[in-house]
Image (cartoon, rainbow, N blue to C red):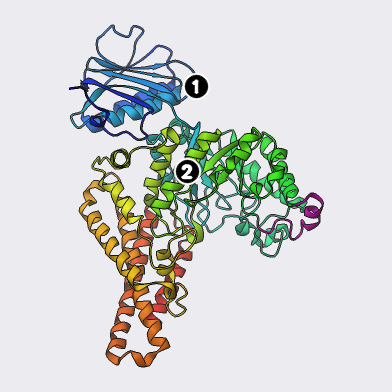
């Protein structure tokens, strides 16, 4: 009986074309990995990745060899190159050997990742033909390292490894102030900033994995962590100290200094200058200039100036497209030297607006989000739909890349492992589009955790589907707002509905039980299992706290309706919740430090302490 594609191990991302064939290639010690004469050091490195991974997973030690005549010594896994660049590749596996032909060094590495995922439970490669290439040239992750949490170098290298496994070729770290500038030492001080040595080490490590580390440094809005420092307050547009003043010559002197020190740490020819959400642009020191040029003209003038600063370092400038869309009449004036990063993070939105860039021949990427920020656990349904819709629009209108964003608004208490499914779905969408949910779930578990049951992905999906507390919020989860709420003020607690709280608590309790039963499946990344369990427990705490908070509000407003016994029981429950939240804070700190420096954890701790204090006062 012919083999069906469903009989093969699930692959992530799913290849463009996959044809199963009869039989399998048994992996054994006498089966060499063969490179052709003239193969590069990068090709040899990919061969070593294949050799080492097969040794770990199958116990077979396949030697790496170079041969002029392919069939001179019998069966082999041949690794061949057709050109100098490109990510396309072909794989042919037969019982008598395997042949990989790649367009470039990156394509060969991605073919290696596919081969490793093809290895079945018997330690063999099922016979098949694969013809594969990505939909988007640039496929990546942007991780916020400025809102409170700076990862360790080890974590960032692990993230590079995950990118390579998922065939993502871009990693970007969002930086506002978290770099140690020698010329401006006050910037980033006390926030566990990255430094030049760390970035050079990460850049080198990423390049070896065919992952491009793209520099990112905020250059207009979101500058409060710099502009609040005494030495730079005069460069703020307004007293809000949010946006850099375009009318101040010192603003560009500062940016030149920062670029001169920051950009040389990266080999990428790209540079993201951000420039998003400059809410007070043209409303203060630049007001006269804005009146002369118009708000869109002022933005254009600014980004042209920073473009030149970046060009002095041989970089092409990327900027966020939000405020560009506020002035669509100016879009043609930006010219073709920019790359526009178009973002929107809800499932519903105007994803078709990227046609404005396409119509003018301007380069752009689509930028969905993991919906992890302002949440105890990501809003998975929203994230999966947002990623898919951006990918569809980008594919149809010719986007040059898909960059999934993982923000850390208001303290970055969202934990990194909770974003793994969002990253993987973005990788799938950026490479070949939609994939059947059940097969994707199995492929995700297998690629990221070494577990092909699909249960881990189902836990991510089901935990990420529970956010209902009886009221809605934008760009976040109600459960997070309840977790941090002050029960005295009860700003969010008052909006909660008991029926919704009970329903969500039951659902999370069921997912938590499944998570505990599945703990062994997280062996490849046990920290991620702990992060999911913390999210489940913090969510349950938020729901219990809201339920008790409603009772407390009712007693406070109409004390005569609550008897002494009920009041004492409520007081005990509130004290127990305070103790529980303190234990959760300790768990959060431990998980935070498992992947990151201490950074601004104290900020999150203060928010939790205020919530605890309100429970103890009640």
Q: Are marks 1 and 2 in contact (CB under 8 Å)?
A: no
Residue 289 visible to an observer of this rendering: yes
Is 1 rendered above or below residue 593?
Answer: above
Q: Residues within 10 Å of mark 1 (few under 14, many from 20)?
A: some
Q: Is residue 282 magenta?
A: yes
- Position of 521 compared to 109: left or right? left
Tag 2's secondary structure?
helix
State which quadrant residue 587 falls in. bottom left
- Residue 353 position, x and y percent, is 59, 43
For this rendering, which residue is in front, 394 or 161? 394
Image quadrant holding the N terminus, namely top left
Is 345 rendered above or below residue 3?
Answer: below
Image quadrant holding the C terminus, namely bottom left
- Residue 389 position, x and y percent, is 47, 43
- Position of 120 compared to 149: left or right? left
Residue behind mark 2 = 389
Is 148 rendered above or below residue 481?
Answer: above
- Position of 398 compared to 302: left or right? left
Tag 1's secondary structure?
loop
Q: Is residue 109 magenta?
A: no
The magenta span reads 279-294
**How far apart are the alpha carbons under marks 1 and 2?**
29 Å
Residue behind mark 1 = 85
Q: Which residue is at 80% across, 55% downward? A: 291
State which quadrant residue 36 falls in. top left
Query: Which marked residue is nearer to the observer: mark 1 or mark 2?
Result: 2
For this rendering, which residue is in front, 312 or 367? 367
Residue 171 visible to an observer of this rendering: no
Q: Which residue is at 35% across, 81% downward? A: 551
- Residue 143 position, x and y percent, is 48, 47
- Residue 456 position, x and y percent, is 28, 47
């Amino acid at each position: 009986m012919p083999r069906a594609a469903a009989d093969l191990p699930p692959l992530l991302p799913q290849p463009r074309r996959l044809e199963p064939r009869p039989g399998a290639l048994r992996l054994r010690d006498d089966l060499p990995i063969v490179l052709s004469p003239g193969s590069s050091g990068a090709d040899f490195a990919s061969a070593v990745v294949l050799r080492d991974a097969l040794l770990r997973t199958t116990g077979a030690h396949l030697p790496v060899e170079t041969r002029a005549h392919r069939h001179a010594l019998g069966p082999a896994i041949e690794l061949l190159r057709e050109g100098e660049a490109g990510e396309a590749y072909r794989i042919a596996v037969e019982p008598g050997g395997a042949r990989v032909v790649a367009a470039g060094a990156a394509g060969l590495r991605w073919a290696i990742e596919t081969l490793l995922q093809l290895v079945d439970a018997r330690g063999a490669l099922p016979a098949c033909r694969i013809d594969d290439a990505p939909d988007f040239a640039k496929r990546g992750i942007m991780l916020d390292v400025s809102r409170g949490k700076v990862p360790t170098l080890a974590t960032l290298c692990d993230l590079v490894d995950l990118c390579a496994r998922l065939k993502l070729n871009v990693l970007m770290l969002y930086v506002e102030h978290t770099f140690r500038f020698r010329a401006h030492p006050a910037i980033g001080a006390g926030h566990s900033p990255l430094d030049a040595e760390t970035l050079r080490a990460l850049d080198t490590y990423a390049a070896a994995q065919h992952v491009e580390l793209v520099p990112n440094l905020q250059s207009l809005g979101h500058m409060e962590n710099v502009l609040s420092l005494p030495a730079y307050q005069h460069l703020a547009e307004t007293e809000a100290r949010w946006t850099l003043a375009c009318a101040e010559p010192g603003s560009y002197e500062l940016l030149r200094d920062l670029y001169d020190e920051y950009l040389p740490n990266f080999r990428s020819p790209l540079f993201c200058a951000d420039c998003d959400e400059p809410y007070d642009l043209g409303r203060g020191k630049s007001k006269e200039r804005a009146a002369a040029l118009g708000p869109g003209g002022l933005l254009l003038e600014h980004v042209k100036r920073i473009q030149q600063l970046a060009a002095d370092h041989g970089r092409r400038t990327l900027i966020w497209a939000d405020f560009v869309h506020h002035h669509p009449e100016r879009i043609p004036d930006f010219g073709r030297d920019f790359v526009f990063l178009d973002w929107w993070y809800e499932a519903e939105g105007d994803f078709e607006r990227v046609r404005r860039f396409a119509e003018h021949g301007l380069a752009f990427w689509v930028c969905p989000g993991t919906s992890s920020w302002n949440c105890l656990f990501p809003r998975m349904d929203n994230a999966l739909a947002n990623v898919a819709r951006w990918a569809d629009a980008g594919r149809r209108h010719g986007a040059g890349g898909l960059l999934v964003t993982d923000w850390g608004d208001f303290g970055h208490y969202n934990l990194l492992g909770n974003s793994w499914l969002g990253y993987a779905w973005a990788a799938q969408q950026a490479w070949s589009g939609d994939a059947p949910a059940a097969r994707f779930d199995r492929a995700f578990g297998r690629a990221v955790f070494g577990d092909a049951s699909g249960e881990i992905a189902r836990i991510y999906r089901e935990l990420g589907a529970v956010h209902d507390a009886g009221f809605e919020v934008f760009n976040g989860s109600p459960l997070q707002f309840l977790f941090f709420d002050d029960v005295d003020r009860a700003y969010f607690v008052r909006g909660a509905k008991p029926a919704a709280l009970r329903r969500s608590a039951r659902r999370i309790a069921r997912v938590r039980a499944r998570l505990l039963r599945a703990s062994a499946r997280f062996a490849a990344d046990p920290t991620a299992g702990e992060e999911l369990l913390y999210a489940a427990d913090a969510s349950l705490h938020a729901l219990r706290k809201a339920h008790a908070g409603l009772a407390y509000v009712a007693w406070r407003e109409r004390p005569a309706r609550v008897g002494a016994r009920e009041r004492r029981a409520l007081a005990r429950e509130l004290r127990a919740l305070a103790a529980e939240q303190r234990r959760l804070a300790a768990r959060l700190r431990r998980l935070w430090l498992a992947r990151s420096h201490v950074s601004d954890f104290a900020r999150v701790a203060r928010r939790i302490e205020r919530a605890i204090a309100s429970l103890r006062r009640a």
